[in-house]
Image: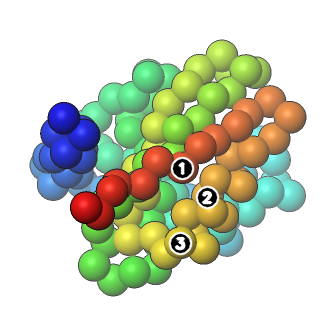
Amino acid sequence: MEESFWTHLHALISSSELVIDRPKGFPRPHAPSVVYPLDYGYLQDTSSSDGERIDVWRGSLPEGHLDAVVCTADVRKRDAEIKLLLGCTTAEKHAICNFHQSAFSAAILVERSTR
């Protein structure tokens, strides 16, 4: 059953264009002192729980495999969603989780098991 989740996410990724609209080092629009630690974007022609497209973080690993997601909960925006992590090292995954931590939001990393 768990593998089906990852298979479906892979189908979304492979059938969508990845758009990076906030490259690594880019300041957050509503908080300029917060800088994106990695490339951040979305999958074109998809939708997420917040009514926007599915969010994606792109790490430094050249193969760019999906092996984790970050689940976020934001009480200020009153939403929860997942963000796909493509080609991220362990350190990058933790940096992404930390990026989503604040007084109003929290995140948890869910990694694909490697049985």
Instruction: Find residue 18 and report its horizontal and vertical position in percent.
Output: 31, 56
60, 1: nearer the viewer: 1
Q: Quadrant of the C terminus?
A: bottom left
Disc number lying in front (2 or 1): 1
Instruction: Find residue 22 and report its horizontal and vertical position in percent.
Output: 56, 59
Residue highlighted by disc 1: 109
Decide which of tag 3 and tag 1 comes sooner along the chain: 3
**Crowd tier of the residue under label 2, counting other residues whose Cα lies within 10 Å: few below 14, some 14–19, many 20 or above:** many
**Up-down relation of residue 77 to residue 18 (above or below):** above
Is residue 112 shown left or right of residue 94?
left
Decide which of tag 2 and tag 1 comes sooner along the chain: 2
Q: CA distance from mark 3 to mark 2?
A: 10 Å
Residue highlighted by disc 3: 90
Kindly indicate the quadrant of the structure image that contains residue 23.
bottom right
Numbered circle sitting on residue 79: none
Farthest bottom residue?
A: 62
Q: Quadrant of the N terminus?
A: top left
93, 60: nearer the viewer: 93
- Give the colour scheme of this rendering: rainbow
In the image, what residue occupies the spot 19% across and 45% down?
3
Q: CA distance from mark 3 to mark 1?
A: 11 Å
**Up-down relation of residue 23 to residue 75 (above or below):** below
13, 42: nearer the viewer: 13
- Label 3 element class: helix
Residue highlighted by disc 2: 96
Q: CA distance from mark 2 to mark 1?
A: 9 Å
